[in-house]
Image (tube, rainbow, N blue to C red):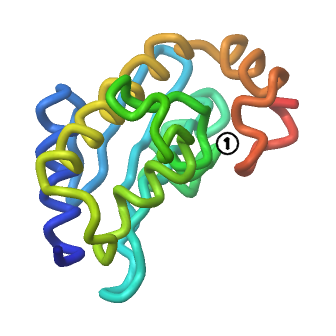
Amino acid sequence: MEAHEIRHLVVTAMDAAGMSRARGARWFVTSDELTWVFELDRGAAWSRRAMTVGAAVRAWTGDEAIRRANNGHVVVDYALLGSAVPDEVVGTRFDDHRSYFTMMFDHTHDLVTVDERLRSFEWMAKDLGHLTQEHTTVDALRQAVSVGSFESGFVDRRLR
């Protein structure tokens, strides 16, 4: 599998989930208080891709809308976010969120079929949708920060 094929599968899954797509492989979900950005990081032809998750507090960004995930007040790689995996891999050797999604984004990993990758990216898109539905306010984002939901990423000090 080639790196551009991973991009195609992720774009297919995210678009099917109804995320608002910006230019390239970037999607936005906006509430009254937050803007969530999901951005597929390119990675070089020899390295894996990654989905960067960013959340920006709209009151802190002024009229400037957040354009890139890494400009958020919370920024984390999706593979490092949470512990859940699709039901079909529970109890297997890939029953670990980080290992599973690192493998799915790695185009050089040849033990995974195209259909398995697409299903995993569809699951990821739904998971990201749930994340945005559960965290629509600054208070909800602060609560998630306080319980360590984003401990593997960057968190603006104002959210701590």
- Tell me the crowding category of disc 1: few under 14, some 14 to 19, or many 20 or more residues within 10 angstroms, Cα based: many
Residue at left offset 23%, top offset 75%:
3
Quadrant assignment, res 33: top right
Which residue is rendered at x = 88% and y = 31% of the image?
160
Q: Is residue 150 above or below residue 139?
A: below
Quadrant location of residue 159? Answer: top right
Q: Say which element carries label 1.
A: loop
Residue at position x 20%, y 46% in the image: 116
158 left or right of 74?
right
Q: Position of residue 85 (x, y in %)?
A: 45, 32
Q: Position of residue 78 (x, y in %)?
A: 51, 46
Q: How many marks?
A: 1
Q: Which residue lies under the disc numbered 1?
A: 73
Q: Is residue 75 above or below residue 149?
A: below
Amino acid type at image mark 1? His
| In the rendered image, the vertical position of residue 14 relative to residue 7, given as above or below | above
Point out the image quarter for the N terminus: bottom left
Residue at 35%, 72% (x, y): give it: 42
**Hey, which residue is sitting farthest front in the picture?**
92
